[in-house]
Image (cartoon, rainbow, N blue to C red):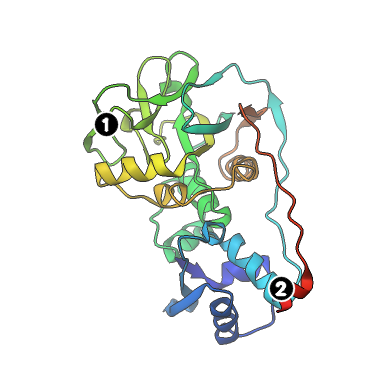
Amino acid sequence: MLLPLEWLEEFIKTGLDKDRISELLTMAGLEVEGEELSGGDVVLEVNITPNRPDCLSVYGVARELRAATGKDINHPRLSLKEDFEPDFRVVIDSPLCRRYAGRIIRGVKIAPSPEWLKRRLELSGIRSINNVVDVTNYVLLELGHPLHAFDLDTLQGGMIRVDTAGSSLEFETLDGVKRTVPSDGLLIWDGKRPVALAGIMGGLDTEVTDGTTNVFLESAYFEPASIRKTSKRLGLSTESSYRFERGTDIEGLIRALDRAAFLIQELAGGTVSKRIDVYPERFSPKQIKLRYKEVAR
């Protein structure tokens, strides 16, 4: 994972140089394999092992540094005003989706992203597209939870439904490639047709374009094994699938949704709906007793 040092320092001020930061991260199990210099910016190359999906973000790495240094951590800015009730339904018809949340944002103005946002995406290996799409990618890198933005006016039936394909079908993804989705591949549907490969890539017919004025913003949890299987069958790996197939935080998806809605409103304007949140079986945290002397040993 490419990690701009300046972005990391926005969350935690360690007062340490890059070599010491690299050493501490490596000691914590996040091996820093190297560093790049790009226009004066330092970018660390961090190897995140498959058992640490919680570290697949700038914020996740910052938490590891907090544990190593005892320094305070700054949390992402979030001040969201909800303006209306969403006239929109979400239905989950497959156990492969355990939670699906979203917000409608009306009256956005699609434009190029500001330079600071473009730069952070570029340093992280992602190209800039427009202010709304860039925000979804930015929050993915910042908090580690993938999001997707649909052009609301292209969604039919006033709804989103999550279900498998049922039978093999052809679907055109955002990259303009028509792919054959297996019968057990998980899809996002509107009222009539599939509109996204769940957790992997959106569809071309519902993408956010320069003419988009209303957006539906998705934040969901998909079963890792399902995403891994479909991604492998289609030969399609993305930043989103990489994280979903390793497991994302089902409780953290709301923070990612609200952070993205806040940034979209800040950069593209618009009014934000109240949250839609379909969560059939809530996660029940377990308490674990831990003896300090056993850890020290």
- Residue visible at 58% across and 45% down? 267
Q: What's under tag 2, amino acid-wise?
A: Val
The residue shown at (60%, 16%) is 87
Count of labels shown?
2
Q: Quadrant of residue 2?
A: bottom left
Asked whether, in this view, residue 6 is left or right of residue 76, the answer is left
Q: Amino acid at mark 1?
A: Pro
Q: Nearer the viewer, residue 95 or 210?
A: 95
Q: Quadrant of the C terminus?
A: bottom right
Q: Choose top left, top right, bottom left or bottom right for residue 45.
A: bottom left
Residue 114 % position (x, y): 52, 54
On screen, residue 237 versus residue 47, left or right, reads left
Residue 265 sits in quarter: top right
- Where residue 132 appears, x then y in whole percent? 49, 42
CA–CA distance in space, label 1 to label 2: 46 Å
Q: Position of residue 250 (x, y in %)?
A: 59, 42
Residue 255 at x, y percent in the picture = 65, 44
What is the number of the mark on residue 182? 1
Q: Secondary structure at mark 2?
A: helix
Rendered-image quadrant of the N terminus: bottom left
Report helix, strand or loop for mark 1: loop
- N-terminal label among 1 and 2: 1
Q: Nearer the viewer, mark 1 or mark 2?
A: 2
Q: 275 above or below 177?
A: above
Depth order, front residue of 274/165: 165
Residue 55 bears which disc, if any? none
Marking on residue 295: 2
